[in-house]
Image (tube, grey):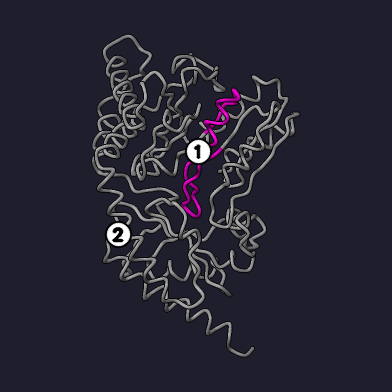
Amino acid sequence: MVERSYFDHNATTPLDPRVAEAMLPWLEERFGNPSSAHCRGREARETVESARREVAEVLGADPEEIVFTASGSEANNSVVFEVARASGREGKILLSSLEHPSVTRAAERCVGEGMTLQEIDPGPDGVVDAEKMIGALGPETRLVCLMLANNVVGTLQPVREVASAARERGIPVLCDAVQALGKVPVEPRSLAVDYLSLGGHKFHGPLGGAALWIHPGAPFEGWLVGGGQEGGRRGSTPDVPAVAGLGEACRLAREELSERREHLETLRERLEEGLSGIPDARIHAVDAPRLPHTTCVSFRGLRGTELGPALDRRGFQVSTGPACGSGKPRPPEALLAMGVSEELALGTLRISFGMTNTLAEVERFLPGLEREVQALRSRDAAPA
């Protein structure tokens, strides 16, 4: 039997057993609608509010500033559409070209309804130039979107600098912090943003447990309407098990942040030390500020869509980037925005660690990776 190692934590993480334990009662004997006035409703409401306090605590925020959502994508969508509605669908949305599709696709829909869109590319190091983004601010700008950490190359973005300049001009800022929370400190007030999204399944919490932080002064009527839950900002009965799990995941992330960063950095450093010995392997954004657990590497002359499945057969799950519906390989857009050639970008793997990974797994992975790279290059070099 093949021993399996999961190195795709930027996609999703395994559930921490302690988080599962917090959720389990609400998947079995406990149930209730938090809006109900009877004892079961009160128990559910107490669980939801306890989780809200934990989310607020990890962000250095107040509980009433937290709105639970079903995903980071929902949180991002709700802000973009809220600002578009409030602006009468006029004006400009300014964003980095590194943003998650839940931001870019929402912005593109707003463009189709009358707004304009301006994207700022990162530099070759995968970091957006703050001065370029600030220079693009104008009286017509209605929203700025800048993620805290990129999900492909792991680079940290100059959110505070850009958001501070936007705030001086009265322009709201949405910060997608989904990939950052649980790996680096995330404090929306310190970042000077108006909206910040997070998702529990990126730091060993549950799928379906996510939240949006809203600055007290930021307008937000809510895009999902119904029964007036979440203070009228999201109409929907909360998913109590997912909310309970998110709260516990946030508590653990807050208490264990230093330990987690040290562990993840140790794994990444050993990985990148080993990668340096593989010919024509290029680690992207290696000198930029990055998340402690993410390595994006390209192998010249190879295709990630071939290398990834070969590694999977060896028991190593990594990300190879998206593919369009036609089946034609498509390189990661973040790398193209950084000026990486399409030929090199097509040979990309994203390797992202989590707290379940060990140095022993990295030591097994490196020789397996080198053998698969050599095998593919030998095959391509063989005469037809």
Amino acid carrying mark 1 in the image: Val
Q: Using the image, tell me which numbered label, if any, was put on residue 300.
A: none
Q: Which sits in the foreground, 293 or 224? A: 293
Q: Point out the stretch of residues depicted in magenta.
A: 146-174
Callout 2: 10 Å neighbours few (<14), some, many (20+)? some
Find out whether residue 150 is within the magenta segment: yes
- The image position of residue 266, as x and y in percent, is 30, 59
**For residue 250, which quarter of the picture?**
top left
Label 2 residue SS: helix
Mark 2, residue position: 266
Mark 1, residue position: 159
Mark sitting earlier along the chain (2/1)? 1
- The image position of residue 379, as x and y in percent, is 55, 83
Along the horizontal axis of the image, is 172 left or right of 64?
right
The count of marks equals: 2
Discs 2/1, front: 1
Residue depicted at 48% across the width and 76% down the height: 373
